[in-house]
Amino acid sequence: MAPGDTYTCPYGYFCAQVWAGFVWKVFFLYDCQIYDLYNWTGTGYWRNNQTSSAPNPYLLGSSGIPIRVLAKSPSSGSADWDPVYSISPCY
């Protein structure tokens, strides 16, 4: 995704956006599992468009311990990806 482009996070998904050198990469996470991150650095963005009954998403640190609880759906915000090693859309 080029700088300045927008995207839609489909209903039922948690979406994460990370800068990948010259473009934004968007990840569409659906399953309730832990997703490991590799080479995610700097500030990025997230959108929570899961069902309203879904648990809060969590950002997990190197030991798998939650370091940040994100808001329930619908919500969005920014994140510093440097300390984040994995994401759980429904911890």
Image (spheres, rainbow, N blue to C red):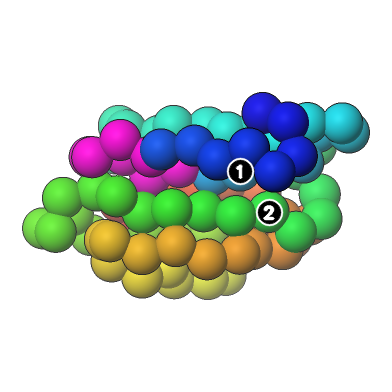
In terms of depth relative to the viewer, which is nearer, 40 or 77?
A: 77
Span of residues in magenta: 9-15
Residue 34 highlighted magenta (yes or no): no
Does residue 87 appear in the picture of this structure? yes
| Residue under the point 73% across and 31% down | 2
Does residue 61 appear in the picture of this structure? no
Q: Earlier in the sequence, mark 2 or mark 1?
A: 1
Residue type, mark 2 in image: Gly
Judged left or right of residue 31, residue 41 is right
Residue annotated with mark 1 = 17
- On-image quarter of the C terminus: bottom left
Q: Are marks 2 and 1 in contact (CB under 8 Å)?
A: yes
In terms of depth relative to the viewer, which is nearer, 56 or 34?
A: 56
Q: Position of residue 86 (x, y in %)?
A: 58, 46
Judged left or right of residue 78, residue 34 is left
The extreme right residue here reads 21
Q: Position of residue 90 (x, y in %)?
A: 30, 51
For marks 2 and 1, give the CA distance. Answer: 6 Å
Q: Position of residue 22 (x, y in %)?
A: 87, 31
In terms of depth relative to the viewer, which is nearer, 72 or 74?
A: 74
| Residue under the point 52% across and 66% down | 77
- On-image quarter of the N terminus: top right
| Residue under the point 30% across and 35% down | 10
Badge 2, how many Cα within 10 Å: few under 14, some, many 20+? some
